[in-house]
Amino acid sequence: MDVVREKRGPDLFHARHSFPPLCQIRERAMGGGKGKLASSPVIAAISLIGVVYYITVFVFVDDLLGLSTSPGRLNACIFSWLAFMCLFSFFVAVLTDPGSVPPSFAPETEDPLKFGEPLKYCDKCSTYKPPRAHHCRVCRRCVLKMVGMIHLMLINNDHHCAWISNCVGYANYKAFILCVFHAAMASIYSMVVFFINTLEEHHNFEGVYNKIFYVLFGSLVSLLSLALSTLLGWHIYLLTHNITTIEYRIAVRAMWLAKKSGQKHHHRFDLGVYKNLSMILGPNVLKWLWPTATGHLRDGTQFAISKADDRPPVSPNS
């Protein structure tokens, strides 16, 4: 029998799963988050950010403009800010709990379609999970509004993001996408500085080591720019349509079936671009680019649905 969740207070999630105060970051980094920060992919990502930052600023910006000049200092400051925001957002995404089903979550059996769709039962967790929640085999629990990952443009069935040693879910999706955004901007910035510097006539490319250095770094920033820009474009699509990678995979078949029957498929959580962005980034546009501004998040078990959807409404999460 289909069952659905009874309405609970909106502050349960905020009290238990929102991003911790900055004073607690050190505690998580040295305690529970130590294992995540010590994982090989996380160390590799941090090292890559450091290497690209150092070479871009202290080699190419310095050689092109000079760090003692105003243009040089300005470009160094811009790139330093992009690198800082990328690293800060990265740490937030790593250390923030993506969101788990609250212990108080209790479905009701009186109205099985109260929220428009039946709740699913997780055999591994031995409990019911709310809409948009999925089980992660790595985390060994259900994650609220699990986004899911793509690797080499293929949807990953494990959903776990190895690069942050964490799932991307309801609570840390904002930090994750801001990390991708600043990483993409920094990579493109570095690539532009590199090619402008390389095209300067005074460069001497003689010597094996010089050639290897330029080829390796040029290839690195070019590949990073392409990969991160593609990933950013994908997540901008997800953001503006209020859909996750997992839901998109399901929607592809739904769209095909709807088209085959002469109907039009509409994603039930798509509320319009601005509202979709506000659901993740927050209602205050001035705080959209700050990864810890997540006070708008609720318990992550209820979501507003579009008026175009003909099923019963879900209580909004904001």
Image (cartoon, rainbow, N blue to C red):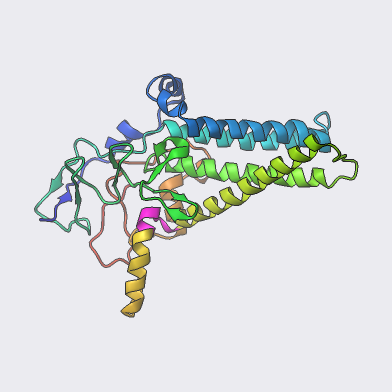
Relative to 143, say whether 265 is above or below.
Answer: below
Count the marks: how many?
0
Q: Residue farthest to the right?
A: 202
Residue at the extreme bottom:
262
Residue 1's image quarter?
bottom left
Give above or below for 106 relative to 20. below
Q: Nearer the viewer, residue 100 or 56?
A: 56
Q: Does the rendering let one see residue 266?
A: no
The x and y percentages for residue 163 are 48, 38
Which residue is drawn at the image coordinates 56% and 31% (left, top)? 46
Relative side of 45 to 298, left or right? right
305 displayed left or right of 228? left
Residue 243 highlighted magenta (yes or no): yes
In the picture provided, is 126 more to the left or to the right than 98?
A: left
Is residue 278 one of those drawn in magenta? Answer: no
Along the line of sight, the residue nearer the viewer: 200 or 207: 207
**Can you name the residue that lies furthest to the front here?**
208
The answer to whether residue 100 shows anywhere in this view is yes
In the image, which residues are magenta?
Answer: 241-248
Vertically, is 177 above or below 249?
Answer: above
Q: Nearer the viewer, residue 122 or 132?
A: 122
Question: Residue 160: percent from the left, percent from the top?
Answer: 39, 42
Q: Main secondary structure of the magenta part?
A: helix
Residue visible at 49% across and 55% down in the picture: 153
